[in-house]
Amino acid sequence: MASRTRAKEDLNLNHTVQRQFDKAARHVKLPSGLLEQIKVCSNVYYVQFPVKIGRNYKIFEAWRAEHSHHKKPLKGGIRYSSMVTQDEVMALAALMTYKCAIVNVPFGGSKGGIKLRPRDYNAEQLERITRRYTTELIKKDFIGPGTNVPAPDYGTGEREMSWIADTYDTFHPGGLDNLACTTGKPLSQGGIRGRREATGLGVVYALREVFRHQKDMQKLGLSGSLEGKTISIQGLGNVGYHAACTLFEEDGARIVAIGEWDGTIHNPNGIDINKLMKWKKRHKSIQAFPGCKSTPKGTDCLQVNCDILIPSALEAQINRSNMKRIRAKIIAEAANGPTTSEAEDYLNKKGALIVPDIFLNAGGVTVSYFEWSKNLSHMRFGRLEKRVGEFQRSNLLNATEALTGHKYPSKTKETLMRGVGEHDLVYSGLEQTMVDAYNEIRHIRNRNKAIKDLRTAAYVSAIKKVGTTYLELGIFP
């Protein structure tokens, strides 16, 4: 009898997101037509444009997907990658809709991308490509402070956002709110303090809240706080680095493995993240870092024995091929779509706790919301009240010293007197956002016995909020 071959695993992120949506939609009482409207991508702009590279012209493919217009403007990053596809951009736009809803940020979801590998081009060439892409978006009204606001993503950063903002401003002279057409900009161009580390820091704030629920942790065989917990991280880019650095320096966690494009390093006793970053800058690689065992595959870090696994690279990294070798008790999805549907089903049955991407990596869009609001108000957060707060605290401390006859230590007094600045407000707002959102989705999971995992609960939260908005707008009477 001929042996049956197992069907190839579906790694398409768009299909994965749709399956996750359908799984959650069964728990939401909304009209079927409205559920379909929430699920589908409203529109996608595909464009090919020429840019002169050297002596020749090269045609670049690019996209901007708009998933949902239930809130304005739409929000979502722009990625530069040779792997960008229309399906991927549509899936990421959908995730942005759900992500914004979960953390109560009033944006619709969008995403964009250009099919290129950034390291194949110099800065001047990348600037020309970016400005031409922006021009194409302007032509079709796919960018603007009140319509669609891009942000950095894989392969882009502050530099690209600054180029985009300047191009938009050139086409809209005199527009007072022009800088609000992008977020993730340099501070000198209307950026906000804390945006660079926002996504990684949001991961940490969420994990701290996860560990505050000791009954949940007992089921995993864990207790206490993040201190001493072993952590493996895939991807030491912006998100992975800031998560690792904060967990290492502030929470006392032990980073036992790091995976990058060129391999994995592993040390069960812990890796000093600051020393590793210096090594990486000097050698352009994490390989051969002193005290660590090096292996050639960047995915080896996924299989390390640890308490928490943080995939912060690309999608579909945890899949059929390696799911049975995943030993972490908590999978914290800092990347978009790092776990396939099949792998998720297996890990859930195994008893692992998956903290889903549509919640966990929402720190970036949360602080982008703060930056957008700052650009529209034309006022730095904390500028008006910082000195007033310091004056009031100073008077209170001086009065306390006079009444008690005792002086505060100078360093203690200086700390207590310090006013609240933009960094403090951004961090505070981000932490509260992540804490509130986690408790909301946890409550949905615990209240409905048919919902067994946090991802389904997060989708239920998002679908209900988006659906309520449509109903209140009168689109689906």
Image (tube, grey):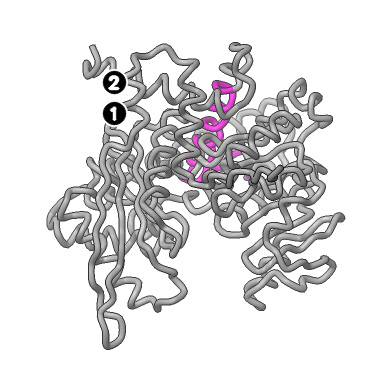
Q: Residues within 10 Å of mark 1 (few under 14, many from 20)?
A: many
Which quarter of the picture shows residue 132? bottom left
The majority secondary structure of the magenta stretch comes to: helix
Q: Residues within 10 Å of mark 2 (few under 14, many from 20)?
A: some
Q: Secondary structure at mark 1?
A: loop
Residue type for callout 1: His
First in sequence: mark 1 vs mark 2: 1
On residue 70, the disc is 1
Which span of residues is magenta-colored?
Answer: 415-441
User: Left or right: where does residue 387 sit relative to residue 37?
Assistant: right
Which quarter of the picture shows residue 164? bottom left
> Which residue is at the front of the view, 76 or 261?
261
How far from the left and from the top, in percent, is residue 189?
33, 58
Which quarter of the picture shows residue 71? top left
> Which residue is at the front of the view, 283 or 201?
283
Is 168 contained in the magenta span? no
User: Left or right: where does residue 75 sit relative to residue 401?
Assistant: left
